[in-house]
Image: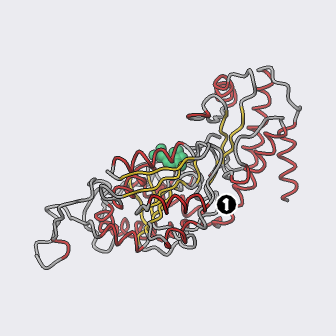
Amino acid sequence: MGPGPINADPRVLRAMSAQLVGQYDPSMTAYMTETQELYRGVFRTANEATLLVDGTSRAGIEAALVSLLSPGDRVLVPVFGRFGHLLVEIAERCGAEVHTIETEWGTVFTPEQIEAAILEVRPTLLAVVHGDTSTTVAQPLDELGAICRAHDVLFYTDVTASIGGNRFETDAWGLDAVTGGLQKCLGGPSGSAPITLSPRAVAVIESRKSIEAGLRSLDPGDADSEVRAERIRSNYFDLAMILDYWGPKRLNHHTEATTMLYGARECARIILEEGLYETIARHALHGSAMLAGLTGLGLTIFGDLAHKMTNVVAVYIPDGVNGDAVRAELLNDYGIEIGTSFGPLHGKVWRIGTMGYNARKDTVLTTLAALEAVLRRAGVTLTAGGGTGAAQDVYSDAA
Ligand SMILES: Cc1ncc(COP(=O)(O)O)c(C=O)c1O
């Protein structure tokens, strides 16, 4: 019950135990094509360029940024938590000129603040995290696409923590590049990063394309024969080549991580079978029950609740309580993991997730009951049954 990774859905684990097939086996390429369509549904996009980057979520971030950014390009990153700093770190390593605006952890920016910074910096790319797991809040993105278009800025976001559990619309919100991961609301393991790219983003990436020797066309009249002086600065994360691998050319690049493909495909199938909006509503219900339960115990919640993600809550560690000792007791005696926190919040809050396969009534109630028992042993005075009672009220009201 931490901020992710969480327990994978057993269906995903079963899918991942299937036998491997060759990377050009018709069933493998059919799975790849099917997975692209499934993730168009999850990302809410018509983008042809929707695929998987092999690697954890930061592989997706790195692929997007290294493929979209040329050295010296200006990037604006609004930072409101640890993962905004990660975008800065990766964009800097791409050789970009990175500008930031910062807001206190637990808060988000207004569209006006971001537009003012765009006007000042004049970036080629706005890179912003959607839900920052470190603070539990999500930056509203719905007005930023129009702002980016008006100022001719590409718009990238990281939805690792939010996708599947919170409303997110790639096309309606005007996103050019979006990357995620399986290990939060999608109910899978880390190790595959779904990505979607708008035609505008693909055009930028294609303009930087330089195909490896050995695969390159030898016909000088063919665009695929061109060798560019300034190549995308990573081979593994070169989205121009990865797009050719996933596209009709099936031009060889890496060997697709077959088992992760099976897992990613199953994650999306489960969500779309339940219904994307129904899955989001399930996260909202169990997240509300957890929040009510923690409040009902008499604990204090961190952050701007108006912008809190549905799937994770940060709660202040009561005065005089050793946060790590409580976490250890929950894990060792009850088999329940809750999360610690980073940076300015380290030692101050626990982060508790209700996501993916773990966004369920039984997990919420068991966690609240166990937390009450552990805190009572640690000497905290609590409302007896206040946690499970408040959560049950949320479930009764929703029924
Ligand atoms: C919002 C966000 N972005 C990026 C990452 C990095 O993901 P990974 O550890 O899968 O590379 C995480 C991990 O928790 C995250 O929460």
> Quick check: can you spot residue 41?
no
| Percent coordinates x, y for residue 326 in the rendering | 69, 25
Q: Is residue 159 above or below residue 172?
A: above
Quadrant into which the C terminus falls: bottom right
Q: Label 1: how many residues lie within 10 Å, few (<14), some (14-19) or many (20+)?
A: many
Q: Is residue 397 above or below residue 338?
A: below
| Percent coordinates x, y for residue 218 in the rendering | 10, 72
**Residue at (50% x, 70% y) in the render:** 40
**Residue at (39% x, 69% y) in the render:** 201
| Percent coordinates x, y for residue 318 in the rendering | 75, 28
From the viewer's perspective, tell me whether residue 274 is left or right of residue 191. Answer: right
* CB at disc 1 and ligand 1 closer than 8 Å: no
> Quick check: can you spot residue 42?
yes
| Camera-nearest residue between 21 and 239 | 239
Determine which residue is flagged by label 1.
Answer: 280
| Camera-nearest residue between 172 and 12 | 172
| Percent coordinates x, y for residue 2 in the rendering | 62, 40
